[in-house]
Amino acid sequence: MKRSGAGRPVVVAEVVAVLLPVLVMLALGLWGLDRGGMWRDEAATFQVARRSVPQIWHLLHHVDAVHGLYYLFMHAVLASDPGEVALRLPSVCGAAAAAGLVAALGVRLCRPRVGLWAGLLYAVTPMAGHFAQEGRSYALVAAGAAGATLLLVGGVRSAGTGVWWAYGATVTVTCLLHEFAVLLLLAHATTLAAARLPRRVWRRWGRAAGGAVLVLSPLVLVSHGQSGQVAWLTRPDWESVDRLLRAFAGPTQPVFVPYLFLVALGVLRQVPRGEVTLAAVAAPLMVLPPAVLITVSRFSPLYDERYVLYALAGAPLLAAAGTDRVARTVARWGERWRGARSPWTARTRMRLPFAALAGVLAVALALTAQLPLLCQDRTAGRRPDNLAAVSAAVGRELRPGDPVLFLPSLARRSALAYPEGFRGAGTSRCGPPRRPPGRCTARRRAPPNCAAGSPGSTMCGWWPRRSRCGRAGTRTPRPSGSNSP
């Protein structure tokens, strides 16, 4: 449908194309949101956000400066309802907003059905659903990146400067939520270069991007001094690349192969001079931030899949553009085979969007193929650990007055997040001490009667994909590394 002469049907189609992915993402995000336990990174959010603002500010000078804005935001969110659902609800909203913004990009750069397909593909991707239910900043960063990209397209096509002010503000807030989102600017610069836009656009973009980088600079300096927090990261390899690609395109083989084919079709489009196309926007967004971070991490490990979640938005846009290309090719073949269309076909073609409905059906099939993964992801066992299970196990094993020894010290987060199971140790010298305001967890040297192997002591810790609490004298697995930012 063309915008000229289509009138009201086009407006309705655009609204539906944006609204439906938002609703689907909301439904998938709210499904199983209260999975019965936080894992250690969520517990960090929960514990820090419940402190006072001065305490949070003091802590950021020592650890987690990269999450400072997010912690302050969650402080306001958890002020009225400090629970697990409230902890994850902003991520659900962020994921829903990202799905709608991806759809809006497809509508703006191509047509309503492309936006509809792209938004729905984003919503049913297991990676998007996973971080929609995580009490961390990554889903909000993805929404900010998608919003900034939409504003970039609007700024290129606008003669005014107001859109560029909004673009600069959005990029700034997104980067303050997580500083690795600054790689988004590299993708946007590549988009402008591919479209061969005039200097006027480059100057406006440069001022907006430069302002965002200037505001971000103090955070980069502070977080660089806290780089020991990511010492647990390892150098990525080809397996890391394959894992990220499958996270973007769908981990199941029946979805992965057709998805890549459609992405390739969406990329293979010529970019006219002076025009921003869908391929010129989506391809750099999908490829460049992960590629740059992976390359840098070969020398200094900084890469993790969640840090580039915002790049996921490019994949469904390209796949939807490829699907649209297939649909238009099939339509041309059909017209040649039928010859001149009958009056009934010409009259009902606008009323019955068969291609759009067929695309929605294909997305529904992809959702069906990945439904077992989505179901598994709604359980606490799919996270690296479950602090509620640790607390429950201690509650079953602990006798009144028994001391508790936390190995490593970060294991104390199970007692801080779920104190019910540790109440029997309240009178013990190993009970949870007061946290200094500059630390996420307390540090205390264990008294002699709490040493490992002493009678009546309990050791608690977390390990990859499992938690274990046992009586002293049992063999304890080696604990995992420190908390990730």
Image (cartoon, rainbow, N blue to C red):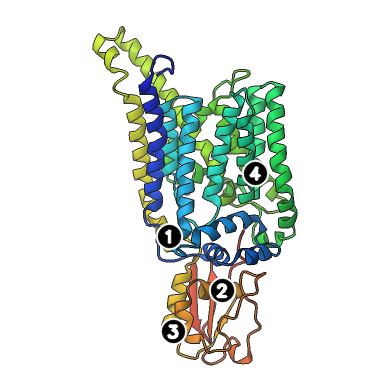
The residue that label 1 is drawn on is 85
Q: Nearer the viewer, residue 103 or 251?
A: 103
Measuring from the top left, give residue 41's x and y in whole percent: 55, 62
Rate crowding at label 3 as few (under 14), some (14 to 19) or many (20 or more) other CA atoms within 10 Å: some
The residue that label 4 is drawn on is 172
Q: Does residue 261 appear in this view?
A: no
Distance between the Cα atoms at labels 4 and 1? 28 Å
Label 4 or label 1, whichever comes before in sequence order: 1
Q: Residue at x 49, y 66 (%)?
A: 385
Q: Amino acid at mark 1?
A: Val
Rate crowding at label 1 as few (under 14), some (14 to 19) or many (20 or more) other CA atoms within 10 Å: some
Q: Is residue 202 left or right of residue 126?
A: right
- The quadrant of the rendering that contains the C terminus is bottom right
Q: Amino acid at mark 2?
A: Ala
Distance between the Cα atoms at labels 3 and 4? 49 Å
Distance between the Cα atoms at labels 4 and 2? 34 Å
Label 1 or label 2, whichever comes before in sequence order: 1
Label 3 or label 1, whichever comes before in sequence order: 1
* Marks 4, 2: nearer the viewer: 4
